[in-house]
Image (cartoon, rainbow, N blue to C red):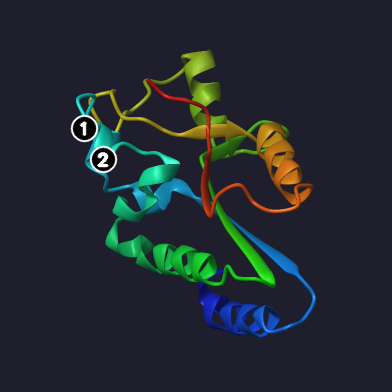
Amino acid sequence: LLDDMHAVLTLLERAKELPKQRRVLLLSNLLSWASCPSLHSKNADASTSVSEDNYLDRRCWPSCEGLMALEAHVMRLNGPNLYACVVASGVAYGAGEESLFKLVRDAHNLATPILLPAPGNNVVPSIHIGVLCAFVCWLLNRKSFPKLYMLACEPWP
């Protein structure tokens, strides 16, 4: 999608000018939070915690700057005839999603040692695909979006 970002944004700008009310929901991911200190520290300050209220303070890896720009642009589209919302989701699993399949299979079989890219205290925000779909449907059935930016992931310690 990031490759076609300019074309998508142009279409959305035109939709903003239509007289009929429209809604745009961007389903993003949590990579735009990847460089936040609170993801890597158990003693994170409440002002830097990962929450819907702190989305303006999030930091990403340089490779995800396009994603952050797209999220910001979609939120700026919000207006009287175009309701916009960004949902940043965790890694989807379940119902055939294979993003975590190999890791879970290897852990279950204990056939080979599992290599961890960190000391083991890293966090992988995740969400079951059924829960994510139910949340998106709930949002789309509402008259308006409750917030411009929302997180969709299972709670982590």
Q: What's under tag 1, amino acid-wise?
A: Asp
Q: Residue at x 68, y 32 (%)?
A: 131
Give how far apart the Cα atoms at labels 2 and 1 are.
Answer: 5 Å
Q: Residue at x 52, y 75 (%)?
A: 3
> What is the residue that sits farthest to the front in this orientation?
80
Q: Quadrant of the C terminus?
A: top left
Camera-side residue of 99 and 129: 129
Q: Quadrant of the N terminus?
A: bottom right
Is 72 placed left or right of 140 in the picture?
left
Residue 38 is situated, as x and y percent measured from the top left of the image, at: 26, 36
Crowding at mark 2 (Cα within 10 Å: few <14, some 14-19, many 20+): some
When the figure is inspected, residue 51 is found, relative to residue 29, above or below; the finding is: above
Residue 119 is situated, as x and y percent measured from the top left of the image, at: 23, 25
When the figure is inspected, residue 53 is found, relative to residue 96, above or below; the finding is: below
Crowding at mark 1 (Cα within 10 Å: few <14, some 14-19, many 20+): few
Residue 102 is situated, as x and y percent measured from the top left of the image, at: 53, 31
When the figure is inspected, residue 33 is found, relative to residue 124, above or below; the finding is: below
Q: Residue at x 42, y 33 (%)?
A: 124
Q: What's under tag 2, amino acid-wise?
A: Thr
User: Residue 48's mark?
Assistant: 2
- SS for callout 2: helix
In which image quadrant can residue 41 be found? top left
Residue 155 is situated, as x and y percent measured from the top left of the image, at: 47, 25
Q: Are marks 2 and 1 in contact (CB under 8 Å)?
A: yes
User: Which residue position holds label 1?
Assistant: 45
- SS for callout 1: loop
In which image quadrant can residue 27 be found? bottom right
